[in-house]
Image (cartoon, rainbow, N blue to C red):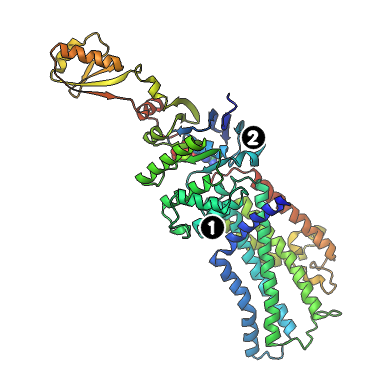
Amino acid sequence: MKRLGNFMKLIQNENMKIYLRLRTWIMLGFIVLLPPFLSLAFYLAGGENMSGWSMVLIESRILFFLITIFTVVVAADSVAGEFTWGTIKLLLIRPWSRSTILLSKYLSTMLFALFFTVVAFIMTLLANLVVFGFSTDANLAAGMTDVAYIWKFYLMEFVTLIIIVTFGFTMSSAFRSGGLAIGLSIFFLFAGNLITGLFALANKAWVKYVLFMHLDLTSYINGGNGPIPNYPTTLGFSLAVLAVYFVIFNVVSWTVFRKRDVAA
Amino acid sequence: MSQTAVARLQNVTKVIGKRTIIDRVSFEVRPGEVFGFLGPNGSGKTTTIRMIVGLMGLTDGDIYIGEHSIRKDFPKAIVQVGAIVENPEMYKFLTGYQNLLHYARMNPSITKGRIQEVIELVGLQGRIHDKVKKYSLGMRQRLGVAQAIMHRPKLLVLDEPTNGLDPAGIRELRDYLRRLAQDEGTAVLVSSHLLSEMELMCDRVAILQKGQIIDIRSIRGEAENQGTALDEVLFEVDHPDAALGILAGQGEGRIADGFLTLSADRKGIADLNRKLVEAGINVYGIRVKTKSLEDQFLEMTGSETIG
Ligand SMILES: Nc1ncnc2c1ncn2[C@@H]1O[C@H](COP(=O)(O)OP(=O)(O)OP(=O)(O)O)[C@@H](O)[C@H]1O
Ligand SMILES: [Mg+2]
């Protein structure tokens, strides 16, 4: 228990380094202001009959995009930043193993993503409750209430976010360059769709095991056959594929971080 | 090998690629001593220090802090060490105080009171709540010292600590390190290529060249040698040539810059002086030119280029 309490102090440190930066509050400003802004703009542009739920869905898609990028930026600084700043030399000469220090960084990055996602959820609901109201049903999916759909949407999208951010964290730890980590992760985010389209044309069974094919899980919400047109998959299968990549990414992060000489 | 050594390096070797950067370096630092680590640029001081604090792995050999190996028992070894490696880089977007708090949180033995104490000790109380990005190099150096001593380490490792300090700051640091060693028994390891500085602050000095230790010597032990060691002695006399003749057979004498120059110990100086006076030579002054560590250092490492 004592050890856990001490470990919480490491998380507290990482949080301090995230939240005592102006940048973080600007990011939060985007998440807070974007939903009311979009809802109002759409309302004024003649969409007053829009269902609140449809608007929640649209805004949430945009916000997840932003949150993923913001969290990747935080992940990049969390490890690579310490090397760039030279502070890693003072951070690692404390009575903690490198693995534990990396864990505190990983967890605080994920907590950042969770915090921003909760804010996004609350803000989209609030903004659309005020502007459009939730009296009309948007029928986002058959056989399911809109609330249930949105709820599942957030879960699925958060899984994808974890995978992309974990990838960014690995790049940050492996290359010690924040810019490279951010760049590759954003490429990952965009290329996902393009590569999915390309591979979907290939008539090969191994396409099922390509990570990019499983980055959009929302097609499972209303009982679909998954993201790959030619090869029906289940949610369980997609999660299993993602889990394998998740483990690989983290093994790489930890191995590199523990072993490498700090010569910065 | 004494059991009391705070830090013990045993055949520490570092090979990067095909180059042997550190080659079987062994030495120990004892409680209460200031140990200097002297070497020209690129000789491997920083690399050795990085291995002592666990930032770099060892290719061969081992390093013990107390009885704990830095390789096998890292947290228990490192908890006894405080260090600055090269420049004291801090989180610029945090205040000095937040930086200290950050490192204090990683060591449960550090209290809030102790943080306050070290802030006053390094003289930063007026600026501690400013962001570090507004600090001068000297102020960051002081903050670096503060984080290194907060947990009262048994071994304090400072890589070129006087870098960026003004003369008053250097003097303050020197006095502080000496006091820390004497009063609290802390073992202090400082690296530098400023030789004159090492003479003033260290008890012993290891001289490093191309990754190898070529000499370890006492500096404060000098007093014991007094009386027997041969120093260069300069006599200022009215007729140097005549004087040289009188003293012929008293060792290698020569005339340099109008001074009669000889090697002699304390007793020898008095004898030589008497001989000159008795022979009717006017002696205006006698100056003993002790070989500084710098001279010895340059003699040993030669006018070698970097590497
Ligand atoms: N990461 C590295 N990879 C390869 N060679 C390195 C690395 N780090 C240091 N070296 C080499 O090791 C040697 C020792 O470097 P080190 O920084 O330890 O010297 P130093 O004594 O601290 O010098 P200075 O007085 O300039 O600070 C140098 O020749 C340097 O080029
Ligand atoms: Mg150096």
Please report whichever mark, 1 or 2, sits nearer to the chain's N-terminal start.
2
User: Label 2: which residue?
Assistant: B68
Q: Secondary structure at mark 2?
A: strand
Which of B171 and A120 lies nearest the eye of the viewer?
B171
B106 left or right, relative to B208: right
Q: Position of residue B63 (x, y in %)?
A: 60, 33
Labels 1 & 2 near each other (Cβ < 8 A)? no
User: Label 1: which residue?
Assistant: B98
The crowding category of the residue bearing disc 1, from other C-alpha atoms within 10 Å (few below 14, some 14 to 19, many at least 20), is many
Q: Which quadrant would the C terminus of chain B be assigned to in this image?
A: top left
Q: Secondary structure at mark 1?
A: helix
Against A146, residue B46 (above or below) is: above
Which of A195 and B59 lies nearest the eye of the viewer?
B59
Residue A113 marker = none
Residue located at (38% from left, 23% from top): B223
- Ligand 2 within 8 Å of disc 1? The answer is no
Q: Residue furthest right?
A: A143
Residue A235 appears anywhere in the view: yes
B147 left or right, relative to A117: left
Q: Position of residue A169 (x, y in %)?
A: 65, 56
Residue located at (62% from left, 90% from top): A44
- Ligand 1 within 8 Å of disc 2? The answer is no
The crowding category of the residue bearing disc 2, from other C-alpha atoms within 10 Å (few below 14, some 14 to 19, many at least 20), is some
Q: Quadrant of residue B246?
A: top left
Amino acid type, residue under disc 1 in the picture: Gln
Which of B144 and A98 lies nearest the eye of the viewer?
B144
Q: Which quadrant would the N terminus of chain B be assigned to in this image?
A: top right
Amino acid type, residue under disc 2 in the picture: His
Q: Residue furthest top?
A: B249
Q: Quadrant of residue A5?
A: bottom right
Residue located at (54% from left, 47% from top): B150
